[in-house]
Amino acid sequence: MPLKVYLQSLGCPKNLVDSEIMTGLLARAGMEMVLDPAAADVCVVNTCGFIGPAKRESIDAILELATYKRCDPHKRLVVTGCLAQRYGQSLAELLPEVDAFLGTGDFDRLPAVVAGRETSDPARYGRPAHLLPDERLPRTRFGPFFSAYLKVSEGCDHRCSFCAIPAIRGRHQSRPLASVLAEAQALAAEGVVELNLVAQDLTAYGRDLRDGTSLALLLRELAQIDGLQWIRLLYAHPAHLTREILEQIAAGGKICPYLDLPLQHVSDRVLRAMRRERSGEAVRRLVREIRTALPHVALRTAFLVGFPGETEEDFRELCDFVREGHFDHVGVFAYSPEEGTAAEKLPGRVPAAVARKRRRALLEIQAAVARARNESRVGSTAPVLDCGTDERGRWYGRLPTQAPEVDGVVYLSPAAQPGTIRLARIVRATSYDLYAQLDEAVAHIEAASRCKHQQAATEPIA
């Protein structure tokens, strides 16, 4: 009988790609994936260790899965991912119920560890490591057949004072262009029409290869792949955003008018303390340049409030910047000190309650901006990717300007066909979601051979 394995994936889409590779490796080794941890011989949790709330979620997941071992002493528990990479030795001492730990750089050993042929050594973690994706690695996707994340690089060379990612994932390393294109072609052959490019630093893609490879070149090549319809850019660090990248987005076609640009703040003083490469004026100038070059682009950004030394004046400056209405989607995080980062030792710690209050206030400001931007769409016609039904049975899709999981959706009427892109007329708007009527008078774009690929679609394993 094959070993039965349950895998729970936590954290960001980049971690999800790792989990999909882990599942592919386990399946290739002849193991059976199950959706119920009670039915598993081995439970695996791929953890996140980025910020405090994510770490707590990971610990809670580990402890919950450990309860199954108390009912059945033959069950085993394996912990992988960023939390194991960052705290492997400490976790091994604190969580004796865990049978093995694997970091971010050697999870390709997971089948051997799960099978009991190898053991893990948590003492080796705490140093930067990553496993660069390769098109030859098997991958079992968890989501819908028509949408996928494609990780193009690993690691980060920036040294932001609040961020532990370089210490966890290591220096930036780009995949060879041929490798990325080969995986994209394989995904398109499986029926993927929506490709979301992810990395810790997407705009730095290719710079380390020193062979002329760049994100702009990658976008041009991806746009030539038959079957792909939408290509969206996520995690585009502003430091390496070039005119050539903007030109690829402006050209239209398959590159979505969407840019995820984490800016973090706009106050000069806070940006300096964060060790960001741009001043507040440079941030404003960049946003103006983007809006001039791409007037219809959807801008997503992330801001960090409550950073050490952030004053009420700094926060008001950030609020005024958001009120100007540049952004379609905004994520706001309350600062939490991270061990080993430079910001941990900075003076002027902002009380957690104040940081949370500032987060709520900034989100309220952005909600009004987002509602106004959404209401301006009412009456217009736009392409919508049909995604099926949500947990409440409502039919929904998304625009090219809405990324999966993090942005709003478009609720559709009448029912449509998952994986197809159709024109729809926007009839109503809220701060985050839209409502639309499918326009049956226009031709729709078929995503792929639906019968074939719907049968092959995989349910999320989490």
Image: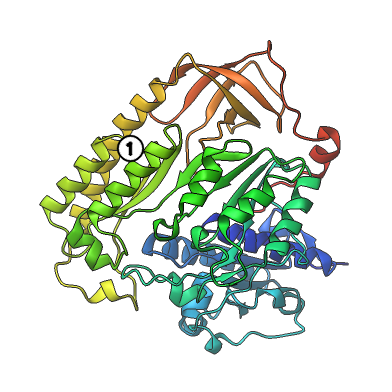
The answer to whether residue 275 is above or below residue 383 is below
Secondary structure beneath dot 1 equals loop
Picture coordinates of residue 240, whole percent (x, y): 44, 60
Q: Which residue is mark 1?
A: 326
User: Which residue is outermost to the right?
Assistant: 1
User: Which residue is outermost to the top?
Assistant: 441
Picture coordinates of residue 232, whole percent (x, y): 57, 45
Left or right relative to 390: residue 299:
left
The residue sitting at 73% across, 27% down in the picture is: 445
Instruction: Indicate the quadrant containing the N terminus: top left, top right, bottom left or bottom right.
Output: bottom right
The answer to whether residue 172 is above or below residue 251 is below
User: What is the image's colouring?
Assistant: rainbow
Q: Quadrant of residue 40?
A: bottom right
Left or right relative to 377: residue 102:
right
Q: Quadrant of residue 109?
A: bottom right
The answer to whether residue 69 is above or below residue 316 is below
Q: Circle 1: is it few (<14), some (14-19), or many (20+) Cα within 10 Å?
A: many
Picture coordinates of residue 306, whole percent (x, y): 22, 57
The residue sitting at 77% across, 63% down in the picture is: 138
Left or right relative to 296: residue 62:
right
Picture coordinates of residue 69, whole percent (x, y): 63, 70
Q: How many numbered marks does the figure carry? A: 1
* Residue 9 visible in this rendered orientation of the protein: no
* Residue 234 visible in this rendered orientation of the protein: yes
The answer to whether residue 132 is above or below residue 201 is below
Mark 1: amino acid? His
